[in-house]
Image (cartoon, helix red, strand yellow):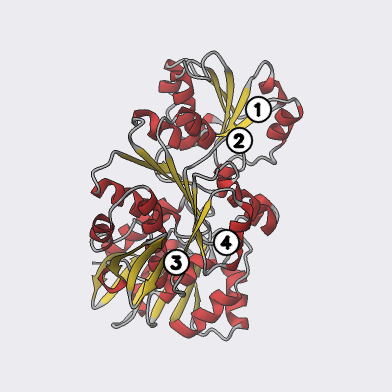
Amino acid sequence: MSEFSGKRILVLGAGISGISVAEVLREQGASVTLSDAREEAAIGRDFDKLRAAGIALALGRQDEALLREIDCVVLSPGVSIYSPLVEAAQMQGIEVISEVEVAYRLCPAPIVAITGTNGKTTTTTLVGEMIKAAGREVVVGGNIGLALSHEVKGVSPNGLVVAEISSFQLESVVNFRPFIAAILNLTPDHIDRHRTVAAYQAMKERIFENQASGDYLILNYDDAVVRDMATRTKSQAVYFSRLNELPSGVFVRKDMITMKWQDETVPICYTRDMKLLGAHNVENALAACACAYFAGVSPRHMAEVLSTFSGVEHRIEPVATLNGVTYYNDSKATNPESSIKALEAFPGHIILIAGGRDKHTDLTDFMSLIKAKVDHLILIGEAQERFKQAALAHGVVNIHLAKSFEAAVNLAHRLAKAPQVVLLSPACASYDMFKNYEERGRVFKNLVRQLR
């Protein structure tokens, strides 16, 4: 019998994760109420299936009356631990846990968990593909697709779960303990949610707080902040590095991705044979190989995936080539650091579409690189004016303001001439114009295809 059986549980947030975990908890025998501050019409989902399953709905209000006789509050990633209702629950001594914590408590299989500011989806997908290539049962989830609590339902104790984990999901974990955890990098992000960079880092570090000596923590040696995390873990720290040959860990030696651990040195794959573009993807590959190594994947299967995997949707994704100009969808770049990595993947002559919901992160390095590599900068959304002023301050020329997303794509099409490329890499969240970055990317691809 599940530990959730018979419990009275309040799930906060009626997005994909909230709905998924509400269904899972009801299946486990819990009495479930799903709440969202938005009215049902504003959410735009069909809740009839939930009602039929016996899940109570409390939509359009979130007051303390919801906490009466509640044993546990489960948070969707979009709900902050600083929200008044969550703080009230904590004050009343009600257990508050994340959807990922529910998944962990229900999951019979070991978990490989991957976090970082950038590269999570690519690295998580690579690890899943490597384990699959080795013939192992594997489930990939977390911050990708459906809620992790839903994805782990069918996995057996002999399988493996590979999970992309965000700082939002780590805010309210309790017992969560992956046997392999990876932290890819750390740059300021989501400060509007976490309030300070220190708090953001502390949330990321929660991925390894319950690990023990038999577990593994994969860390980016080239990121000084991440490298230092080895001093705060009880698990075995394993470094990866694109820039340094390491005495132990995963690194690049004469263009060869190499794994060195204890008495074994294993060549895996030449970086030139990888299908993924960019130095940042070499780092993602190194991290993936480290995770896969300790998950028992052979170098042959790692190399097979690296030589064939062409990337995830919305991350430097080639869309079409029109009149010698290739259009790339990098909608997943929701912060300047991610967009910087995309810009670095090209030699120059870029028509860049950027902007959206402003996270108010520092733009210095981003604008310096734009000045060096971008022929035309097209700005959209709420961040338009701040980005424009920052671009002007860095001597960027050919700055264009577009009144709509469609106008930006059409302008890029009019301006672009081979050998230029058109790159959507917003460096911003999408919520001013779209539901999420996926919708933004899909709209971009549709607009590009219509240009034909």
Q: CA distance from mark 4 to mark 1?
A: 30 Å
Residue identified by numbered label 3:
425
Question: Real-space Cα distance between discs 3 and 4?
Answer: 25 Å
Which callout, 2 or 3, points to the residue nearer the camera?
A: 2
Which of the 4 image quarters holds residue 7?
Answer: top right
Name the outermost residue toward the top.
6
| Towards the viewer: 452 or 146 | 146
- Residue at 37% x, 82% y is 347
Q: Residue 206, relative to residue 356: is it above or below?
A: above
Residue 448 vertical position relative to residue 375 in the rendered view, above or below: above
Mark carried by residue 95: 1
Distance (Cα) linking label 2 and label 4: 22 Å
Marks 2 and 1, Cα distance to the nearest angstrom? 10 Å
Q: Is residue 435 visible?
A: no
Q: Are marks 1 and 3 in contact (CB under 8 Å)?
A: no
In the picture of the structure, the residue carrying the numbered disc 2 is: 174
Q: Which residue type does callout 3 highlight?
A: Ser
Kindly report which numbered mark, 3 or 4, lies closer to the viewer in this rendering.
Answer: 4
Q: Is label 4 in a helix, a strand or a loop? A: helix
Residue type at numbered disc 2: Val
Residue 251 placement (x, y as % from top left): 41, 68
Disc with the residue nearer the chain's start (2 vs 3):
2
Viewer-side residue, 32 vs 400: 32
Reading the image, the residue beneath label 4 is 226
